[in-house]
Image (cartoon, rainbow, N blue to C red):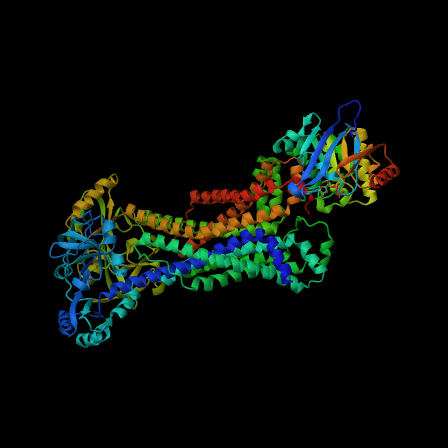
Amino acid sequence: MLKTTLAGLRAHLLRLMLTALAITLGVGFVAGTFVLTDTMKAGFDRQFTASAEKVSVAVLAKDDKIPESTLRAVRAVSGVQDAQGQLRGDAPLLGKDGRAYGETPTLGMSMATGALSRYTIEKGRAPAGPGEAVLEKTIAGHTGYRVGDAIRVLDKKGTAHAFTVTGLVDVGVDQEIGFRGAVGFTRPVAAQMTGEHGYMEIDVKGAPGVSDDRLRAAVAAAAGPSFTTVTSHGLAKKLAASSGLDVDSIAMFFLAFAVVALFVAALVIYNTFNILIAQRTREMALLRCVGATRGQVFRSVLIESAVVGLLASALGAIVGIGLGYGAALIFNSGSGMPGGSLTVSPTPFLVGIPVGLAVTVLSALMPARAATRVPPVAALRAQTEGRVKGRAGVLRVIAGALLGAAGIGVAVLALTSKPGQTPFLMVMVAGALLFLGVIALSPLIVRALSGIVGWPPARIFGVPGRLALANSRRNPKRAAVTTVALTVGVTLMTMFSVALTSVRSTADSSLRDQFPVDYQLSTQTGDDDRPIAGDAVARLRAKPEFSAVIEIRTASATVGGHKEDVGSMTQRFLGRDLKPKVTAGSLTDLRPGAVVLHQRRAGGLGARVGGTVSVRTRQGTANLRVAAIVSGESILPDVLLDETDFTRSFGPKDPEQVYLIAKPGISTLSSRAAVDDALKAYPAVRVQSAADIKDQLSKALDQVFLLVAGLLALAIVISLIGIANTLTLSVVERTRESALLRALGLTRRGLRRMLSLEALIISLIGALIGVVLGTALGWVAISAALDSAVLGLPIGRIVLFVVLAAVAGVAAAIMPGRRAARTSIVESLAAE
Amino acid sequence: MTSTVVGAPPAVLAENVVKEYGSGEAAVRALHGVSVGFARGAFTAIMGPSGSGKSTLMHCLAGLDTVNQGAIRIGDVEITRLSDKQLTLLRRDRVGFIFQAFNLLPTLTAEQNILLPLELSGRTPDRRWFDQVVDTIGLRPRLTHRPSELSGGQQQRVACARALVSRPEVIFADEPTGNLDSRSGAEVLSFLRSSVREMGQTIVMVTHDPVAASYADRVVFLRDGRITSELHRPTPDSVLDALKRLES
Ligand SMILES: Nc1ncnc2c1ncn2[C@@H]1O[C@H](COP(=O)(O)OP(=O)(O)OP(=O)(O)O)[C@@H](O)[C@H]1O
Ligand SMILES: [Mg+2]
């Protein structure tokens, strides 16, 4: 029997090629993910080791910084050749616009000298004294500063100091610096700028011949137990751990998409084996006639799938090495991560090949069972051509309806509960259920839709169009699986773009409706002890360009027993220029002794309008009456006190945030000039315009979309292979039919067109189902996740998906179409 | 040997047709210079032992296959010089086919199958002619059925109707009754004969069956790729005799 199987396999090898390609790509994705993460990990490890190797022993600060006295003690240890402390603190770099750059203040740090200098100076040289600084290369790129440029950096008190950039430094992977950017100074300058005196770390270089371990013991004794002392090896580990690089979660993210690709591949495999078995009914029956048992037939199909799965998966693992390395190169060039040579562990093979094999064999299981049901008498029946099959089974309809109902039920439940993460996850479950329901009902859906989608081609293209329509409906199950494979990718793609567009329109709408502000002034994050100076606010008030200058102050208090931030705003603008959504009560009731709560706090406090909430401050506890409850995305403090109450409790304070509203008719240009003029002396104040915020969000969302689209592309390619595959197999199956049509006078071109149109119909149906499902899921997901979501519909993008799917579908029909048109009529007529 | 028809030019004419399959050592010569004409409005049968080249000749005559030497005319068109596209259009507009089996597209109803050649050429069907053909073959109640819901005989009759409805210059039939029992076979054959008698249709039919051949006006005998003899106004007995002579 094995011989027969292998002979059959050889005979059908060509037909299995496309299936194998689907598996290869799916496995390639999985293997590629491992290769990528392995390569990244290895690159980082190398880098951390290289960086740490310059140091023999390091003393690391724990809770407290390391004092100068400890440095002196360490220097005195015998065997220590050199020891230097590293200072780190805030040192906001001013951008070319004269304002502190970035969301958080730049890090100022001391640069070690001599053998201990851990960071690579890429261009120029290290700072040698006052007035000189090096820039970390990423922030240099962002701000546009180059070696030789003059820069200004704020010191602890907010005074700007001028420096010359002497060089650019590559710090490698360092989460803190990666996030904030860094300016490097000599140690005394760093101390002066940041106002820091304790060290983060003391790096020690041992004298020649002194082992790291012995030196570590000696240094640890000198440094005392309040600090951690490690060898260079330990330091490398520490660096890796604190780099914040979670290679594993990158892997998880990619693997999620790999699973989608494999699922699509499974659909393609399932379809292929089903078709092959339908085509080989005679052969199977003949085997049964000559005495093969059901078990043997079953096994022969499974062995066939196993051989295909194994070969394709092995190839996939190899393809994955290429994919993974390519991805690693892209990552490196994009984000300043360490380059490095390709690293391949056994994982891609150990995981990829079994996964590919399992997916293939499992997908072939049902078709194999179908093969065992071929009765021996089928060998005697003349008609082996694909028949026009009956309708979907009752079981299928019931299952589909139940799954669909369950999906809708969960979605409704998610929509009715409070927006947040749990309902969002519920929507994902609902999506999966709905999708399974659609799969179950797909023969019906595809049949119904083919009538609609196929109508125009049938009208426009005459006979080929009508035949294509008829062919697309002749075997609804087969067409359905082919279609659903494409639907998977299109659904996810649509869901993401609908969700992202909705996020954007939600943000836009809350910006517009609730905060019609033109500028947001804030301090850099983590810089709370330096609020916006009252003088700056006074200057802004003096500008005639603005109709409202709204100050937001916050402080910490105990609300209803929990520590909570409370705040106040320039109250006369409340309800006039800032209009949060009021769900209960009235904003005008916010008077001394009252409070306005955001819904998300009110729930937890059990507070209602008219009720009271206890607020404890240093001045004592007050029971404040709840004047109103607001909802929606809000820049108001969640617990908003009356302004006079706030000042009485916390004293006069500078605001953490200021919102500016320009008078009607003032151009963006002149309002911006007014802001810049008022804040000239306050470079640390961060200015963002509403347009900037929108822009940043747009850019961020577009990046997310591109990443997701790139990762989903493979699943879509696999589903297109599925379409090509189904068509190729159908062409084989319909050889006689094609010959007949050709004999009756259908031109080669007509035959090709017929297949293209069939592919067009299939892919359009797949895309349409995907678009509808994806839009619904995207909307439901966003409604479930966001408070007062505003739904958006990226019509342009969706139309693009449908058009691309249609074009790709037609392209998938090119090869099968050529094949069908090439075959000789006479030979095909003779073929059985 | 050339069979000449006196009077009107033949509907189909083959001159010195040579057909080889394969090339070099493995070449098989299926037709050795066949010259034969088929008169307009006549029902001609082609007979001969298995492998004698009947199907090959028919495929060449119908422009389904190319020839190595010689010329074939359908009406006034020399078809051996046509491109694939031109041949396709010629078949579409001037030739009808009935095969032994698998004549119909499974996705189309009987009516759609019958009208297929007309639709391919974009002609509007002549309704009266269509009705007449459908009524003659007695398939009106079956028009909306698909091939899988029809018996073998019914399927062949639908195929006949399809061949006739476009009023082609010639209909080629390769063992049209080969898969049918004698009664359904007789129905199909008398239908073909009446279309020749009453509508002036030209039909060329390949068959193994002397009874089937006896429906024709003339029988042409083929052996080893050559025309050996012919018979006019055949009866089953005279055909059997001729066949016996052929085999010996
Ligand atoms: N595609 C082909 N390749 C090679 N030889 C072929 C091919 N088709 C037919 N032949 C050969 O040509 C000769 C004539 O074949 P043809 O099919 O025309 O015979 P036939 O008279 O129709 O036979 P039958 O009565 O069995 O249908 C035979 O010897 C056959 O083996
Ligand atoms: Mg034959």
- Where residue A505 appears, x then y in whole percent? 37, 48
Q: Can you give x and y, in whole percent of width and height, for residue A163 in the image?
A: 14, 52
Q: Is residue B139 above or below residue A289?
A: above
Q: Looking at the image, which is closer to me, A218 or A196?
A: A218
Q: Which quarter shows the N terminus of chain A?
A: bottom right
Residue A798, position as x, y percentages in the image: 45, 45
Say left or right for A531 vs A9. left
| Residue B140: percent from left, percent from top | 76, 38
Q: Residue furthest right?
A: B237
Left or right: where does residue A388 sit relative to residue A159? right
Splitting the image into 4 quarters, where does residue B111 fall?
top right
Q: Nearer the viewer, residue A136 or A440?
A: A136
> Please, which residue is most extreme toward the top here?
B7
> Is B229 rendered above or below residue A734?
above
| Relative height, residue A737 to residue A226 (above, below) | above
**Residue A563, can we see it?**
yes
Residue A65 sits in quarter = bottom left
